[in-house]
Amino acid sequence: MSQFEFKMPRMGESITEAAIITWFKNVGDTIDEDETLLEVATDKVDSEVVSNVAGVVEKLLYEPNDVIKIGEVIAIIRTGSQARSSRGEKFERKIEPSKNVQKPKKAKKSVANQNSDLFFSPLVVSIAKEHHISFDELARVPASGKKGRLRKSDLMNYIADGRPHKVAKLKETSGFKVPDLKFDKGKGKIVEMDRMRQMIADHMVFSKHTSPHVTAYVEADLTEMVQWRNEKKVEFQKKYNERLTFTPLFIEAVANAIVDFPMINSSLDGKNIIVKPDINIGMAAALPSGNLIVPVVKNANTKNLQELAADINSLSTKARENKLKADDTKGSSFTISNVGTFGSVMGTPIINQPEAAILATGIIKKRAEVIERPEGDSIEIRQMMYLSLSFDHRIVDGFLAGSFLRRIADNMEKFDLNRKI
């Protein structure tokens, strides 16, 4: 007989923590290999987590709604031949950290609050250090977690609000003083954010604090692409039993551009840039709740149009039916947000961490354009679309971003009307 430490599994490169929604097993229950143990939520998707061993649940170390760092021990499962024979044995359910898990750091006692005896998770301490927040200041941050626990979202909201409880302010070196503005909240209905909306909010604030965002724009003439797609969509549906939308055509153009500019397909790790070998394109999709999620088309550059359409249609259907699995949202190296779906002309998207860039595609609209030809200029009605690329200026400079964005537009514009399906 032995004890197996069940850890919060990794569910994506950018995911550092997950919240427990519910346990499917109680202490003393038997569990089989590949049987569901619990359901968790991240900022991307709710997902069921299965056990990779068979045995008896001996301890559940956390309660529902607790936010756990990836890799932390969350349950103890007793394995071995004696595990099932002792199913009737009573186990005490204690919410206590495993001996092998690093204990949260204890805050130093503040001079202003001698009775403080607070504990902060390693993640909260790490974020505080990054923003030069002392333990004295940390103790003053409003906490919403269980038993007054300071959550990551509490700290990120506090930072976004300008750190109102900052202990030591810099000396003023000029006569100009920024006024402390207090906004009137006014009257209205209070709508509490659901769990996913809170996680999305945390991720957006984290991204803006992490990456210096710069956005570049270009317009593309999609007249030939629109004409080809309109002529072929019925035939495509009959031949492959798949809808032909513009999304696979956009992803195809982006994936081919990334092949030419591989540094776009990268992320930053400290002082090192990691260039990803696989081109996995995330695409923003709407959920029934109104929230957005980013399912991933894996190895997009290796797939033909029919395979891209099949993947995209399948992922979109799963998103609408709220059936996406954790693996469907893992591993993206570049993201596309089609803001044109909502009628937007263009957008300034926020980077999906830890990626280096994100592309927004606007609505395709007919416009009168001056067309230059050897025989002379003419004004024609063309199908035009704006592309906007937000990029992390720590990794990507303006020349690379502009060249990459122009290549995407070129790939879309130089569309072969004689292309076979």
Image: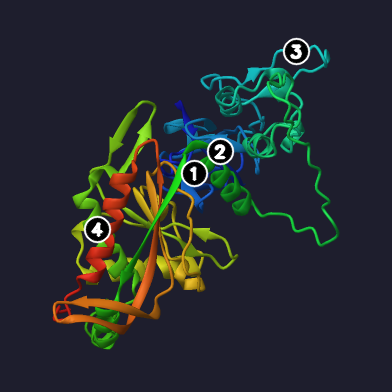
Where residue 305 sits, quadrant-wise, is bottom left
Using a 10 Å C-alpha cutoff, classify the residue at mark 4 as few (fewer than 14 neighbours), some (14 to 19) or many (20 or more). Answer: some
**Residue drawn 76% across and 17% down?**
117
Element under disc 1: strand
Element under disc 2: loop
Where residue 170 sits, quadrant-wise, is top right
The residue where tag 3 is placed is 109
Using a 10 Å C-alpha cutoff, classify the residue at mark 1 as few (fewer than 14 neighbours), some (14 to 19) or many (20 or more). Answer: many
Q: CA distance from mark 1 to mark 3?
A: 44 Å
> Reading the chain from its start, which is encountered first: label 4 or label 1?
1
In the image, residue 253 lies at what x, y percent?
A: 25, 63
Viewer-side residue, 83 vs 18: 18
The reply to whether residue 8 is in sight is no
The residue where tag 1 is placed is 31
**Residue drawn 57% across and 24% down?**
122
Viewer-side residue, 279 vs 328: 279
Q: CA distance from mark 3 to mark 2?
A: 46 Å
Using a 10 Å C-alpha cutoff, classify the residue at mark 2 as few (fewer than 14 neighbours), some (14 to 19) or many (20 or more). Answer: some
Q: Is residue 351 above or below residue 343?
A: above
The residue where tag 2 is placed is 87
Contact check, label 2 and label 4, Cβ < 8 Å: no
**Residue drawn 30% across and 77% down?**
370
> Reading the chain from its start, which is encountered first: label 3 or label 2?
2
Q: Amino acid at mark 2?
A: Arg
Contact check, label 3 and label 2, Cβ < 8 Å: no
Q: Amino acid at mark 3?
A: Lys
Which of labels 1 and 2 is toward the front?
Answer: 1
Q: CA distance from mark 1 to mark 2?
A: 11 Å
